[in-house]
Amino acid sequence: MAAGADPLLIAAGYSPEVHFFDALHGDLRRTLVLKDYGHVNRLAISPGGKTLAAAGNPHVRLYEVQEGSSEPTSCFDGHKNNVSAVGFEATGRWMYTGSEDGTIRIWDCRSQKCQLCHENFGVFDRTAVHSVDLHPNQVELLIGDGEGKVILWDLTANKVRHTLAPQEGVPVRAVCIAQDAKVAVCANHEGTCFVWKLSGAFEPLQKIDAHSDYVLSCNF
């Protein structure tokens, strides 16, 4: 991401550290050690590039991107398991998270309070959420879960509008909606991608055998 005139590359993984690199020269600028984190599952940058969200197990905390205190500026408590998805809406006023505890939460970034929570119930109990993407309209979330479902959650109505099962029982690992909102894709544990046209409903376009093993991410 770019912060001011200096482009930064921000990286994290299976350690409680976030590294900030000079993207042009490869120099390590800063290392942020996250307290109480065993590892980092996801990172997200707020609109404007000033704030970094780090999702772990079960923590979600915000930090300053530019050099400053290593202490979080905000903490969001409520998840009970790995937080597998995190992102900001277009103005940065609120944030969404998804977790293996089977919930998706909407957070007010200023008050740090959960404003909305969807419990993703499966056959027997809540089902792990693996991926969440915000629709360009800023009022719907596309969700992929551990039972192989793809769900469209309307935040304004607090209602699930669509539920798809492209490959029954095969966990969905990643979901994405194109920026023009014309198509959506999911990728699953067997390496298959399913593409839909968005026209009020989900119209199947393609089934793509993309990989021989599970997919970590998909994007347009």
Image (cartoon, rainbow, N blue to C red):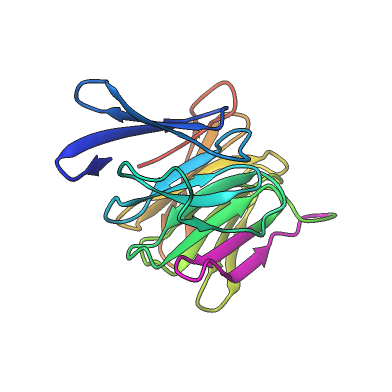
Does the image show residue 131? Answer: no
Farthest residue to the right: give it.
Answer: 124
Residue 137 vs residue 170: left or right?
Answer: left
Residue 6 vs residue 185: left or right?
Answer: left
Q: Position of residue 42 (x, y in %)?
A: 51, 41
Q: Position of residue 52 (x, y in %)?
A: 40, 47
Q: Quadrant of residue 70?
A: top left
The span picked out in magenta is 104-123
Q: Position of residue 151 (x, y in %)?
A: 59, 58
Does the image show residue 57? Answer: yes
- Is 107 magenta? The answer is yes
Residue 213 vs residue 26: left or right?
Answer: right
Can you say whether 146 is above or below 160 in the image? above
166, 77: nearer the viewer: 77
82, 131: nearer the viewer: 82
Residue at image location 52% in from the left, 70% down from the top: 154
Residue at image location 45% in from the left, 55% down from the top: 73
The N terminus is located in which quarter?
top left
Q: Position of residue 25 (x, y in %)?
A: 20, 21
The C terminus is located in which quarter?
top left
